[in-house]
Image: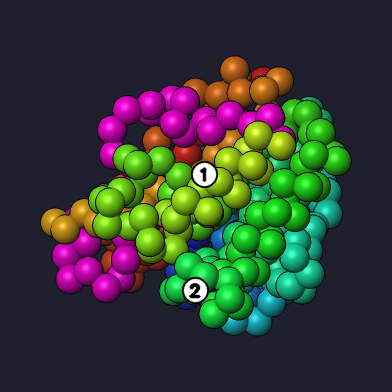
Amino acid sequence: MSVTLATWNINSVRLRAGLVARLMAEEAPDILCLQECKSPVDKIPRDAFAELGYRHMVARGEKGYNGVAILSKLPIEDAGDLDMAGLGHARHVAGRLENGVVIHNFYVPAGGDVPDREVNVKFGQKLDYLTDMRDWLHAEKPGKTILVGDLNIAPREDDVWSHKELLKVVSHTPVEVEHLAGVLEAGRFTDVTRRDIPEGRLYSWWSYRARDWEASDRGRRLDHVWATSDIAGAAHSSRVLRHVRGWEKPSDHAPVFASFDF
């Protein structure tokens, strides 16, 4: 059984439903995990996606903010959701495939602009969210698990356009990187993307603020695909679809793909 999975912060699934449909038509992943859907679940245009073969969906949503969804060609069972840091946000949903593999789709808080929890509540919430993820994984000790999503942290020096200039910028600060490493280690995960693409700069997000995002190329790798050690060896063919960032009225994120031979 070969399964191709993609994760994409879509920045409004209704506003960009046409882009989601285009990705489905052109790339046809078996499973597409979306973050920042910004929609109640009943407003997600699932009929349009079902016509393209994505007849199965598990999702959590709220009006105008956050929201996560797993759209699948394969049967998938709703495996619940987690409210990390007690925020009450729609930032996680899990689905279980018929082979027992569980997919966790996360949208970690961005953390605001100032990397200091004493003056920026949002930064504190982000760190607390990651701490709760770590503690949950320590207790859960998951197996046959894929964790994907916009984790809002670029952990490696070559995951950002300038390690030196971004050390004090939210998403690449040492404390965030340390917290993310704690999550990865607690779940005994492998960073599948970097296992497959170990060398060189690699980004999945480019700010809307850049006049020419492609020319300036000031990106960050905020979107991740991880797998527990028992299935990480089945993963291959990771790629970031950079060109999707150049589509008309795009998300500021590009989709990240990986395939698994179970």
Q: Residue at x 65, y 69 (%)?
A: 125
Amino acid residing under circle 2: Gly
User: Is residue 225 shown above or below 126?
Assistant: above
Q: Residue at x 77, y 42 (%)?
A: 137
**Horizontal and vertical percent for residue 100?**
81, 31
Q: Which mark is residue 112?
A: 2
Looking at the rendered structure, the secondary structure element under dot 1 is: strand
**Horizontal and vertical percent for residue 174?**
47, 51
Q: Residue at x 65, y 34 (%)?
A: 185
Q: Which residue is mark 1?
A: 224
Hey, which quadrant is residue 128 in on the image? bottom right
Q: Is residue 27 left or right of residue 88?
A: left
Looking at the rendered structure, the secondary structure element under dot 2 is: loop
Return the residue nearer the eye: 194 or 19.
194
Q: What range is drawn magenta here?
A: 187-214
Q: Does the magenta portion include 209?
A: yes
- Residue at the front extreme, as displayed: 118
